[in-house]
Image (cartoon, rainbow, N blue to C red):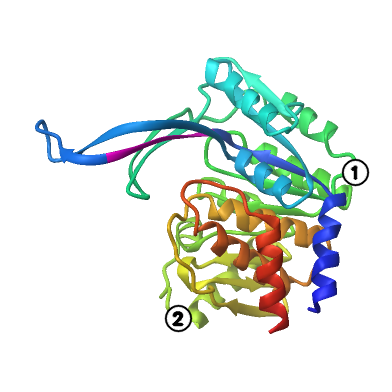
Amino acid sequence: MKKEDIIQLFDSFNNMKVLIVGDAMIDAYMWGKIERQSPEAAVPVVEIEKHENRLGGAGNVARNIKSLGATPVLCSVVGDDFRGKHLKQLLKEEALSTVGILTEKSRKTTVKTRVISENKHQLRIDEEDTFSIKVEQEFLELVYSNMKDVAVIILQDYNKGVLTPFVIESIIKKANTLNIPTIVDPKTKNFLAYKNCAIFKPNLKEIKMGCNINFDENNISEINSATKDLLQMITAKGILLTLSEKGVCIQTADIFHHTLAEKRNIIDVSGAGDTVISTAALCLAANVDFVSLSQFANLAGGLVCEKVGVVPIEKTGLLKNAITYFTN
């Protein structure tokens, strides 16, 4: 791609509305220092110096979409608790709409608390409910009401209960009727439920567990075989498989292409998948060819791994890296 084409592509993001449907949560952080071991057990004592709450899960995808210049609309279900109210407040603080947030009584809003010291995770504490939502039809009506003028739909699954098989099938069917492309970030529970989506983006662990297969992760031909089989299972247009430090690969009916990861100073991989799917979604909406789409997503995922914690991609940094990558 030429420099002017890349700039034009990134400018086009500013005119896109993106619907994100899935499990929103709060990413809580406790930052501190370690100077001694506990006398009660063989664990370090972290002296907490700072607390911070951020949008996580599908909420972090919304942050990435906004950071890339597009307009995100998040549809999710939270609990009728103070954390659900706090999640809505976090959306408002980021100038993100709360119109797609549905509250369900007897549900707990998901919170992942990370204890960080010396630039790495020391501990993570999860508070959540993972049973399927009981308000499927009401939620679907809310999702449908937000589909107007949408360029692409992201289905962001964290196995927390929002994306049930019925919700998944209904949204993809409705989107296909409206000619809105769908891109999926799956987990293993409903792995094969996302039939007829445009792009399906698992990682190595998810494709092995979701398809109940095993293969050599260092053997590209075996990976190719696995992605080809998965493509047929879910009748998607493309499989975007993330390979961690080995990069990404894209599988369609006609091509298989492996893109190596760029050399990075990896600090924290949390949230990298959110950045990958956000970047890929906007490229999908812009009709970027699938190989280039995978390369843009690969660059974005690598860049956010150089930051501590779950953070959105910086558009200017990605644009600069993309120009260097594609024009050298």
Quadrant in the picture for the N terminus:
bottom right
Q: CA distance from mark 2 to mark 1?
A: 42 Å
Q: Which residues are magenta?
A: 26-33
Label 1 neighbourhood size at 10 Å, few (<14), some (14-19), many (20+)?
Answer: few
- Which residue sits at x=59%, y=78%? 258
**Residue 3 in sight:** yes
Asked whether residue 287 appears in the rendered view, the answer is: no
| Residue that badge 1 annotates | 149
Q: Identify which amino acid the numbered label 1 is placed on.
A: Asp
Label 1, secondary structure: give it.
loop
Please say whether residue 132 is one of the residues in the magenta stretch. no
Residue 301 picture location, percent across and down: 57, 61
Q: Nearer the viewer, residue 114 or 167?
A: 114
Describe residue 92's horizontal placement relative to residue 304 as left or right: right
Where residue 140 appears, as percent x and y from the top left, is 75, 31
Question: Can you say whether 34 is above or below 83 in the image?
Answer: below
Foreground disc of the pair 2, 1 = 1
For the residues labelled 2 and 1, say whether their Cβ atoms are less than 8 Å apart. Answer: no
| Front position in the image: 178 or 125 | 125
